[in-house]
């Protein structure tokens, strides 16, 4: 369950392409990420712009855009292009930004999808990969256009995500977070909900559950409740309620499945 700035993606200098179901909470990174709805509809959000994509339609998250996807179990192509393959695109766009993140033109979508499928071929040379990337980014620029990039709210939300990543195990609440960033709690609440489509408490619960799962993967025999409290949950009841809400099963059952899958 990805939720924040993906620092672990920064060292990855190769193109990633896969075709599977996807569900990710708001996050951002330096790479360009492209989603192509290959089966059913997909809920896609980039910054504060949301759309339900029909089959074949495309969503583009530019560098450092806050984005989230939910394909509801249907398969979608995901393409993640690191900065090492974006030099030509970055030179063309300069300080501008993709004007709209969504592409619905069938001809353009089909051309981008063909390039995505071609990039899945592991035998492609780096030069061939670069050619497909430039074709994709060229089609995106021609279709979506570029605009001046001046949305200060995006930069604020990126900073908030970093702060929550570092402090999610502490007693963070709306009032303390708003004060930390110099806003009234009412304004900050509206700003947060606009970007992430759910409130701070839900976001923190998701983030803490993600950290809990990471902790249990590191030590499958750790005490579940102790690990949950260390990740920021203030009670066993709150933890069990949140975990069951997001995963559909109690945490003990999930950890049992995790141990079985990993052979522990």
Image (tube, rainbow, N blue to C red):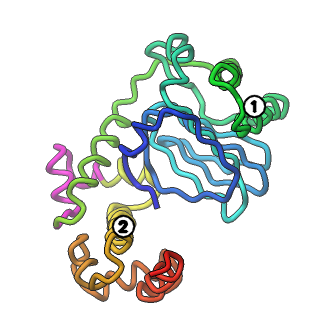
Q: Residues within 10 Å of mark 2 (few under 14, many from 20)?
A: few
Q: Is residue 187 magenta?
A: yes
**Residue indicated by mark 1:** 115
Instruction: Say if 93 sits above or below 112 in the image.
Output: above
Q: In the image, residue 65 lies at what x, y percent?
A: 46, 36
**Residue indicated by mark 2:** 214
Q: Residues within 10 Å of mark 1 (few under 14, many from 20)?
A: some
Nearer to me, 258 or 197: 258
**Residues drawn in magenta:** 171-188
Q: Is residue 207 left or right of residue 126?
A: left
Would you identify the image quadrant in which residue 72 lies? bottom right
Identify the residue shown where x is 69% and y is 46%. Answer: 77
Q: In the image, residue 119 lies at what x, y percent?
A: 70, 34
Instruction: Say if 239 sits above or below 176 in the image.
Output: below
Identify the residue shown where x is 18% and y is 59%. Answer: 175
Instruction: Say if 43 sits above or below 33 in the image.
Output: below
**The C terminus sits in image quarter:** bottom left
Q: CA distance from mark 2 to mark 1?
A: 34 Å
Q: Main secondary structure of the magenta part?
A: helix
The answer to the question of whether label 2 and label 1 lie on touching residues, with beta carbons closer than 8 A, is: no
Q: In the image, residue 147 lies at what x, y percent?
A: 53, 19
């Amino acid at each position: 369950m990805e939720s924040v700035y993906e620092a672990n993606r920064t060292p990855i200098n190769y193109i990633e392409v896969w075709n599977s179901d996807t569900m990710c909470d708001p996050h951002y990174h330096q790479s360009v990420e492209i989603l192509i709805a290959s089966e059913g509809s997909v809920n896609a959000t980039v910054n504060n712009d949301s759309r339900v994509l029909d089959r074949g339609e495309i969503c583009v998250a530019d560098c450092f855009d806050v984005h989230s996807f939910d394909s509801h179990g249907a398969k979608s192509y995901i393409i993640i292009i690191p900065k090492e393959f974006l030099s030509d695109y970055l030179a063309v766009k300069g300080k501008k930004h993709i004007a709209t993140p969504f592409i619905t033109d069938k001809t353009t979508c089909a051309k981008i999808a063909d390039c995505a499928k071609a990039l899945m071929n592991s035998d492609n040379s780096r030069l061939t990969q670069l050619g497909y990337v430039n074709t994709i980014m060229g089609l995106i620029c021609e279709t979506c256009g570029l605009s001046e990039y001046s949305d200060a709210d995006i930069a604020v939300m990126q900073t908030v995500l970093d702060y929550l990543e570092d402090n999610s195990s502490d007693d963070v609440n709306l009032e303390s977070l708003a004060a930390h960033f110099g806003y009234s709690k009412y304004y900050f609440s509206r700003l947060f909900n606009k970007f992430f489509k759910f409130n701070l408490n839900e976001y923190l619960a998701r983030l803490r559950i993600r950290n809990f799962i990471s902790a249990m993967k590191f030590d499958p025999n750790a005490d579940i409740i102790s690990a949950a409290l260390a990740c920021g949950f203030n009670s066993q009841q709150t933890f069990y309620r949140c975990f069951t809400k997001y995963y559909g099963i109690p945490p003990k059952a999930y950890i049992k499945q995790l141990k079985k899958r990993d052979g522990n």
